[in-house]
Amino acid sequence: MMAGQPEISVVIPLYNEAESLPELHTALAAVLLPYADRWEVVFVDDGSTDGTFEVLKGLREGDKRVKAIRFRSNQGKSVALAAGFREAQGEIVVTLDADLQDDPKEIPRFLRKLAEGVDLVSGWKARRHDPWSRRLLSAIFNRVTSGLTGVKLHDFNCGFKAYRRSVIDELRLHGELHRFIPVLASWRGFKVGEIEVEHHPRKYGRSKYGAERIPR
Ligand code: UDP
Ligand code: MG
């Protein structure tokens, strides 16, 4: 029997997130239960060395909605997202981080916002659980980006987003450009919206981003 085209694809970049994965998959399956087999998750293992891919293989064996891509080496989140987008088949594509800082429970709110006629919904971590130095840098980045581009978002760094397929098809990602997807989309005439999202502290592992990424 051929399964139909999924309505929703969830694309998740992972770099050494083995510990978070089972919990993440369970939370996704729970929140997407109403969609039965009409959703998929595309995990993109960005060159992990902690057994992430072995955990993915286990998940895939137990759930045919799970797809897994593996990079031989660490390519960075943008490249991982771009690979996930190429694989995703859904009319709607949701992206979120793998570390449970983004809560899958909030996916229905993103879908409702899309249903209002928005093409791209960007999350806004209004209360972030990250060190103050990172929050300060982010605040500066967000003000400058919003000012320079004219796109009125509070949080250009939020990995939690929902897109209509048309936006994905039209945009190509390069390097660190993933932060600017809402800008590119808005400039091309797509309707961009924002919703506040909860942000949890990291439970397992640690952030893959340190000071070295700032110049990029
Ligand atoms: N990530 C990735 N490749 C990288 C760095 C990070 O795929 O080179 C993933 C990571 O596994 C997570 C998401 O991107 O799912 C965000 O990374 P992280 O939580 O380290 O960033 P932070 O929340 O500290 O900004
Ligand atoms: Mg994180």
Image: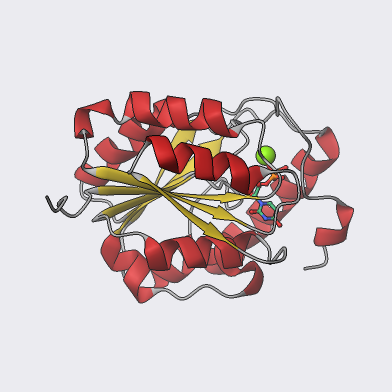
* Quadrant of the snapshot with the C terminus: bottom right
Instruction: Name which residue lies at 46% across and 60% down.
Output: 84
Q: Position of residue 5 (x, y in %)?
A: 18, 55
What coloring was used for the rendering? secondary structure
Q: Position of residue 83 (x, y in %)?
A: 49, 66
Q: Is residue 18 left or right of residue 24?
A: right
Quadrant in the rendering for residue 39: top left
Q: Position of residue 131 (x, y in %)?
A: 81, 33
How many numbered marks have been drawn onto this rendered protein structure? Answer: 0
Instruction: Name which residue lies at 47% across and 37% down.
Output: 59
Quadrant in the rendering for residue 191: bottom left
Instruction: Name which residue lies at 23% across and 56% down.
Output: 91
Is residue 120 placed above or below 158 in the rendered structure? below
Instruction: Name which residue lies at 52% across and 45% down.
Output: 57
Q: Nearer the viewer, residue 212 or 72?
A: 72
Q: Position of residue 196 (x, y in %)?
A: 47, 33
Q: Is residue 34 left or right of residue 46?
A: left
Q: Nearer the viewer, residue 143 or 51?
A: 51
**Residue farthest to the left?**
1
**Residue farthest to the right?**
211
